[in-house]
Image (tube, rainbow, N blue to C red):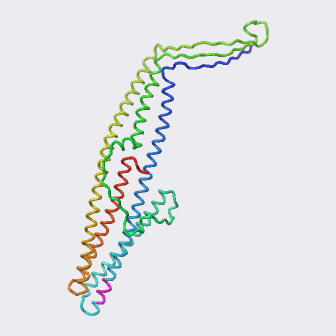
Amino acid sequence: MMAGAIVVTQPVFMGGAIIAANKIADISEQMAANSLDAQRQTTLFNIDKAYWQVVSLRHKEQLAESFLTLVRKLDDDVRKMVNEGVATRSDQLKVSVKVNEAEMALAKVTDGLVLSRMLLCQLCGLPVSEQILLADEETDQIAVTQQTAQPDVEQASQNRPELRMLQNTVDLAHQTTNLLKAGNLPQVLLTGGYAVSNPNVFNSFERKFAGFWNVGVLVRVPIWNWGDVRYKVRAAKGAATIASLNLDEAREMIELQVNQKSFMVNEANKKLALAQASIAHAEENLRTANIGFKEGVISSTTVMEAQTAWMQAQSQKIDAEIDVKLSQVELQKALGTLE
């Protein structure tokens, strides 16, 4: 005896399980896209930090070279004064020590610059030995656009991919709950098919294939499952509540972060203004010290102090400019607008 059948089943009502499953698939796609966006913003943030680190070290290298030129000039002048008998050997040794310190500082900055370039190349996907030239490292001053930061929490809530991912988690938990609830609801399906047998059902003595079509409605009603679905639904609702609490906490933390980064931008602008004012005083101090040294009324120690103060003021100005740039980048990341 041989028999065969083809049956087609079309769900009509599955308790909302199919709708929930489709929504879960859509939410999963959104979560993947948001995760990709979060990784992209993190990568851009790290690249910006490495970029401005290279710019900072390059300007400090130029500053160290200028400072070394200053102390070498002073060392040469003091040597001449020692030869003329108007300066002591102790004065010459003090200046020589300062020259050595300046050379060591220059070597440290140069080594740090090389490593920073390698890190930037690695983040950009370039060979670490690639010799790159950045747009801001050869300028006389770092281009700084000062702006008063206003904390826009609403913008951050809309743009931050982390919040969108947490919202996806909440939605996913709700749809998982709906999917589990469908296990306690009736299910209605349309069925249809064709069955064939040999000998056939119409004449069991005739050894020929014959069959028939069938159409029907299948209804499945769950009666008792020992509370299995109820416990799973309860656990899913608990997961959804936890996800909602995590989302609320993340919103609060991002609000705090946006306000902190806005404060940092305004604080960096103030520090830059103070550093620029210090530059003017340090340059005037160095100028008067050099004049006094040439006239013989100021010692070499005073000149070295003026040179050191000038270098510290220049270094603080570079740090302040970089802090402004980095604070702006951090604020953009906090707002979710980093591109």
**280 horizontally vs 53: left or right:** left
Q: Name the spot of residue 124 as percent of width and height, x first.
A: 49, 57
**Foreground residue among 140 and 99:** 140
The residue drawn where x is 36% and y is 57% is 326
The residue drawn where x is 37% and y is 51% is 332
The residue drawn where x is 27% and y is 90% is 82
Q: Is residue 79 magenta?
A: yes
Figure quadrant of the N terminus: top right
| Residue found at the very far left of the displayed protein | 297
Q: Which residues are magenta?
A: 74-80
The image quadrant of residue 100 is bottom left
The image quadrant of residue 294 is bottom left
Name above or below for residue 305 compared with residue 13. below
**208 horizontally vs 100: left or right:** right
Question: Can residue 195 be seen?
Answer: yes
Q: Name the spot of residue 144 as percent of width and height, x first.
A: 35, 61
Which secondary structure dominates the residues rendered in magenta?
helix
**310 horizontally vs 237: left or right:** left
Q: Name the spot of residue 191 as percent of width and height, x first.
A: 61, 16
